Amino acid sequence: MSELTDELLADARERMGKSVEATNGEFTSVRTGRASPALLDRVSVDYYGAQTPLRQLATINAAETQLLTVQPYDKSSMKAIEKGIQDAQLGLTPSNDGNVIRLSIPQLTEERRRELVKMVRHIAEEGRVAIRNVRRDCMHDLRELKGEGEIGADDEHRAEADLQKQTDARIAELDALLKGKEEEILEV
């Protein structure tokens, strides 16, 4: 294959990899029955008028399997952090003792587990769509190169076959991540 097709395929491979990573990142922010500091990744706090990620304002630990602790670097930000956690609508109620904010992770009901499974399936589908969009863009670029006479029909066909293999591999990787997350959610 030509250098042009190699560059296009390398770019597509990188973009597909980023789509899988982003989807996996979304998975970590979905609450399971277990305490995980990643649950608070999406929380931002109004800190002196600026929206600031919680991770920059406090140390977050999973003290026990059902308990998260948030220890602010600046004690005066305690109220703002509590408000940020409540505003994030995670279904967690913060309690603070003046030094540490504790978040008790309640056991999930069967109904809530099913909702979470639907949510991660939706996230996975968005990831698949992102991967397919990368494939579509790359196919379009390959056809343009063929139309301009920069690559031959054989090179285009080989590159498309290689691109389809990459797409299938990334989608399989995403499906494996989804399966693992579903098992984690449904685990009682």
Image (cartoon, rainbow, N blue to C red):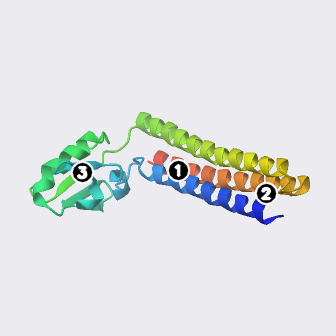
Task: Give the camera-side residue of 13 and 184.
Answer: 13
Crowd tier of the residue under label 3, counting other residues whose Cα lies within 10 Å: few below 14, some 14–19, many 20 or above: many
- Residue 165, how many percent across, how many down? 76, 55
Q: Image check: 161 left or right of 121? A: right
Q: Which amino acid lies under the numbered mark 2 shown in the image of this protein?
A: Asp
Going from the N terminus, do you reach mark 1 or mark 2 first?
A: 1
Q: Name the residue located 28 percent from the left edge and 62 percent from the top edge.
A: 61
- Asked if one can make out residue 144 in the rendered structure from this viewpoint, the answer is yes
Q: Is residue 58 left or right of residue 115?
A: left
In which quarter of the view is residue 128 placed? top right
| Residue 93 seen in this snapshot | no
- Mark 2: few, some, or many residues within 10 Å (few <14, many ≥20)? few
Pointer 1 residue: 23
Name the amino acid, label 3.
Answer: Leu
Name the residue beneath numbered marker 3.
Answer: 103
Residue for badge 2: 162
Residue 49 placed where, x, y %? 18, 48
User: Mark 1 and mark 3: span between their CA atoms?
Assistant: 25 Å
Q: Nearer the viewer, residue 78 or 96?
A: 78
Q: Residue at x 14, y 54 (%)?
A: 77
Residue 55 higher or lower than 108, as above or below? below
**Label 3 secondary element:** strand
Q: Quadrant of the N terminus?
A: bottom right
Q: Secondary structure at mark 2?
A: helix
